[in-house]
Amino acid sequence: MASQYLDRKSRPLVAVTGMGVVTSLGRGKEENWLGLASGSSGIRPITRFPTDGFKTTIAGTIETPETQPYSAYELASEIAEDAITEALQQARLEIGRPFAGPLYIATPPSEFEWPLLSDLYRHGSSIQSGSAYERMLAAARTGQFEAYARHLEFASIASRLQERFATIGEPISICTACASGATAIQMGVEAIRRGETQMALCAATDATVHPEGLVRFSLLSALSTKNDPPSKASKPFSRNRDGFVIAEGAGALVLESLASAQARGAQILGLVTGCGEKADDYHRTRSKPDGTAIIGAIRGAMEDAGLDTVDYVNAHGTSTPENDKMEYFSLRAVLGESLERTPVSSNKSMIGHTLIAAGAVEAVFSLLTLATGVLPPTINYDEPDPELPLDVVAHKARPARVNSILSNSFGFGGQNACLVFSSLKEAMS
């Protein structure tokens, strides 16, 4: 392979030739970027189920027809299809024809939502023998409930998407908490670098705004309880931050070796030049106090890209007291004094935390920042935290010269993944 298609470690350079996104701000890149660049919020009151008794009653939900019964499985599958379709169209790859590479898809844990559990329990109660659990299992095996099985099969979304887009080989399902979307992209990058494929389809999706999701994160004291007004709840890096806002979303990238992309005349949207990951086993939700895992992931991505500094950081920035503090000190440990000159903003101030999908959604936003030279703001930054002295691009978007971006994704359970995106000019210099 000619040297212009290789990075400094003689690996194939990995280009992005298509991307798609769905969030509470809208479906597609155009709607989302208009919302981000204008500092709009997609956070709203939850209306799809009663929230009486909940301390948190808001979320970044995706609008669905009121006549359509809600199912996290169906919505996660649907928005993933939308994001992938948009990415393939931008890459000028025909929908319906086989995709010449594997699928890496990040999906949430498979589980029944409350309406399905309630229905199953009610039907199980009519069975005469066995424990309550045994009666529920018996009811689940009846024809009426067989259709629910896909909700409990972890690979069901991946299988559905593989069939829809005819990707090569068995699809790879990934769930590394809130680092999942970035991990899916990293796996695609590594497959291309190893020469296993010239293309990879990388996506992530999550639709966890249902009663179980709200209960789960409320019990962890992870969610903001500032419900009124909803648009003000997510306030990353602010002194009065009190938790994240749960949200739905999907993001997708078409990755391709630079040689393949240029040979077929594809538009190069940017390059993935760095990947870093590091985990710790300190706690199910909290980060290791010394920050070594987060620092290791950031440093790994920077070193992989061959960079000492970047032009912009797309922060994980969840708006929880601990995460924002850990992210600041970890960035400071790696970037040093250059952090004072580096803008760091959080898309989650506007769209909320899309959980499993976050790394892929924010990868799309990072690439749009690279393409437009516009830094999306951190809204709701009304009370700066003096312990976190960052340039968060407060309130309003800002034009800037951007050729390299670090995008951070940190998950519960100490799972951390970071990506570096570079312009073609930056990577070839």
Image (cartoon, rainbow, N blue to C red):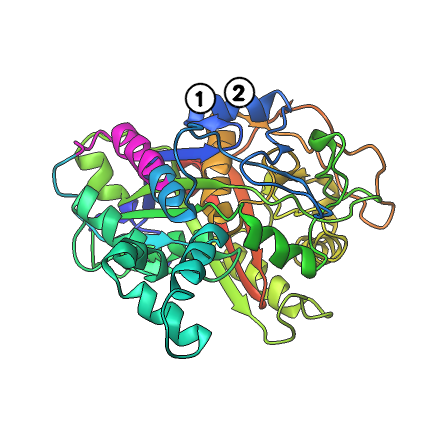
Q: Amino acid at mark 1?
A: Glu
Query: At numbered mark 2, what does the secondary structure look like: helix, strand or loop?
Result: helix
Residues 62 and 162: in front is 62
Q: Residue at x 37, y 73 (%)?
A: 128
- Name of the residue lying farthest toward the left: 97
Residues 370 and 31: in front is 31
The x and y percentages for residue 315 are 62, 45
Q: Residue at x 29, y 28 (%)?
A: 90
Is residue 105 part of the magenta span, yes or no?
A: no
Is residue 92 part of the magenta span, yes or no?
A: yes
Dominant secondary structure of the magenta stretch? helix
Q: Amino acid at mark 2?
A: Leu
> What is the CA distance from the residue labelled 1 to the residue labelled 2?
6 Å
Circle 2 is placed at which residue position? 34
The x and y percentages for residue 69 are 40, 38
Q: Which mark is residue 75?
A: none
**Pointer 1 with pointer 2, Cβ within 8 A:** yes
Q: Which mark is residue 30?
A: 1
Q: Residue at x 38, y 48 (%)?
A: 73
Magenta stretch?
Answer: 80-95
